[in-house]
Image (cartoon, grey):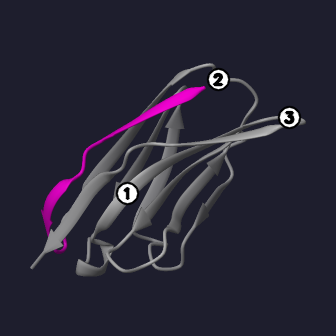
Amino acid sequence: QVHLVEYGGGLVRAGGSLRLSCAASGVIFNTIHMAWYRQAPGKQRELVAQITSGGDTVYADSVKSRATITRNGANVFLQMNNLKSEDTAVYYCNWKQGTTSVYEYWGQGTQVTVFS
């Protein structure tokens, strides 16, 4: 089991920046990737950014050039700049690991609200 806890959500003015953190604990092995997803009211959960154990990154088109995902050991971070109202959502940390069997874990989510 991997337990994920997110930090750093809150109220941010449009154009501002935010750094989300996710701390993983528990039985961590053969990490495949770590990622941030978000879910806005009335919408499906969507991928924001992903980083593999090898450091390869993927970003949603909507945040490309405004977001940076990084990892430091069992922590993963999401730096978001030039925030827009459409970035308002609950942000979730996602962790996938395993070999023959793959295990996926989610954090409880942290609210990000962008106001203008």
Whether residue 9 is situated above or below residue 24 in the rendered picture:
below
Structural crowding at the residue carrying mark 2, measured as other residues with C-alpha within 10 Å and reported as few (<14), some (14–19) or many (≥20): some
Q: Find out whether the residues at labels 3 and 2 contact each other: C-beta distance under 8 Å.
A: no
Q: Residue at x 24, y 51 (%)?
A: 9
- Percent from the top left, x then y, of residue 22? 41, 38
66 or 13: nearer the viewer? 13
Numbered tag placed on residue 99 in the rendering: 3
Structural crowding at the residue carrying mark 3, measured as other residues with C-alpha within 10 Å and reported as few (<14), some (14–19) or many (≥20): few
What secondary structure is found at the residue carrying circle 2? loop
Question: Residue 2 in magenta?
Answer: yes
Residue for badge 2: 28
Residue 38 is drawn in which quadrant? bottom left
Main SS type for the magenta part?
strand
Q: Which of the two labelled residues, at mark 2 and mark 1, occupies the earlier sequence position?
A: 2
Q: Residue at x 19, y 73 (%)?
A: 15
Amino acid type assigned to the residue bearing label 2 in the image: Ile
- What is the CA distance from the residue labelled 3 to the residue labelled 1? 27 Å
44 or 9: nearer the viewer? 44
Residue for badge 1: 91
The quarter of the image holding the C terminus is bottom left
Amino acid type assigned to the residue bearing label 1 in the image: Tyr
- What is the CA distance from the residue labelled 2 to the residue labelled 1? 22 Å
Q: Residue at x 53, y 79 (%)?
A: 61
Whether residue 72 is situated above or below residue 53 in the rendered picture:
above
Whether residue 3 is situated above or below residue 87 in the rendered picture:
above
102 or 53: nearer the viewer? 102
Whether residue 86 is situated above or below residue 108 in the rendered picture:
below
Q: Residue furthest front?
A: 42
Question: Residue 29 in magenta?
Answer: no
